[in-house]
Image (spheres, rainbow, N blue to C red):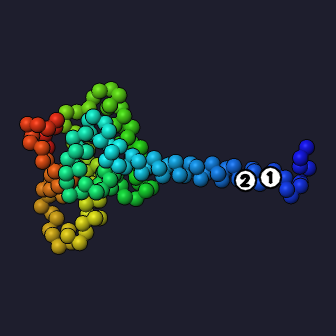
Amino acid sequence: MLFKKGDPGGPGWLYALLPALGGVVLTVGVALAMHTTDQASFCGSCHSMSEAALTHQQSVHAKLACNECHAPYNLVAKIPFKTKEGMRDMYVTATSTIPDLIHPGGETKDVTQANCLRCHSETTSTVVMQSKQYCTDCHRSVPHMPKIPVAKRSAADA
């Protein structure tokens, strides 16, 4: 036996180091997964989202990650939102029930609206915002610029 019970140089430090190391690996893994799944390259890798990724590349928001607009900014709200939306996306993909036109639901519209207002607060503070419920009601082609003629697109900007 290398160490005697109670020996200060004994393996007790391993019992503290291993969980700490596991926590670091888990934290880095989750952070990497969150960052990767936020990106247009990830979102656009699914056939159903390729049109959205293409039009996003041509828009004024091309430098932004998809989830800078499409997921809550607050990390505590973002994790369950991304989990729910990701599970829904996987389900419709696995069951081949993806709609021809993908429209955001009410919760996604609310999240997108909050992100528009967060990023553009200086602009929106001088504008009367009561004419429409969502910024995208008037500015729907800003995040996904429809530069491709409708006849050549896989989904119309409806």
User: Based on the displayed image, in which of its 4 quarters is residue 50 positioned?
Assistant: top left
Q: Amino acid at mark 1?
A: Gly
Label 2 neighbourhood size at 10 Å, few (<14), some (14-19), many (20+)?
few
Q: Position of residue 19 (x, y in %)?
A: 67, 50
Q: Residue at x 14, y 68 (%)?
A: 128
Res. 94 mark: none
Mark 2, secondary structure of its residue: helix
- Position of residue 126 relative to residue 5, above or below, is below
> Residue 143 appears at what percent x and percent y?
21, 53
What x and y, as percent, mark residue 121? 25, 69
Q: Furthest-top residue in view?
A: 95
Q: Based on the displayed image, in which of its 4 quarters is residue 51 positioned? A: top left
Q: Is residue 48 above or below residue 27?
A: above
Q: Nearer the viewer, residue 101 or 36?
A: 36
Please tell me which residue is depicted at 32% across the width and 39% down the height of the picture.
Answer: 45
The Cα–Cα distance between marks 2 and 1, rounded to whole angstroms, is 7 Å
Decide if residue 51 is in sight here. Answer: yes
Residue 107 visible to the viewer: no
Q: Is residue 42 left or right of residue 147?
A: right
Q: Amino acid at mark 2?
A: Ala
Secondary structure found at label 1: helix
Report which residue position mark 2 lands on: 16
Answer few, some or many: residues within 10 Å of disc 1's Cα (few below 14, many 20 plus, some between 14 and 19): few
Image mark for residue 12? 1
The x and y percentages for residue 34 are 43, 49
Residue name at image x 24 percent, y 57 percent: 61
Instruction: Give yes or no for contact between labels 2 and 1 (Cβ–Cβ under 8 Å).
Output: yes
Q: Considering depth in this image, is 151 or 106 the residue closer to the camera?
A: 151
Q: In the visual, does 105 lie left or right of 77?
A: left
Q: Is residue 144 left or right of residue 90?
A: left
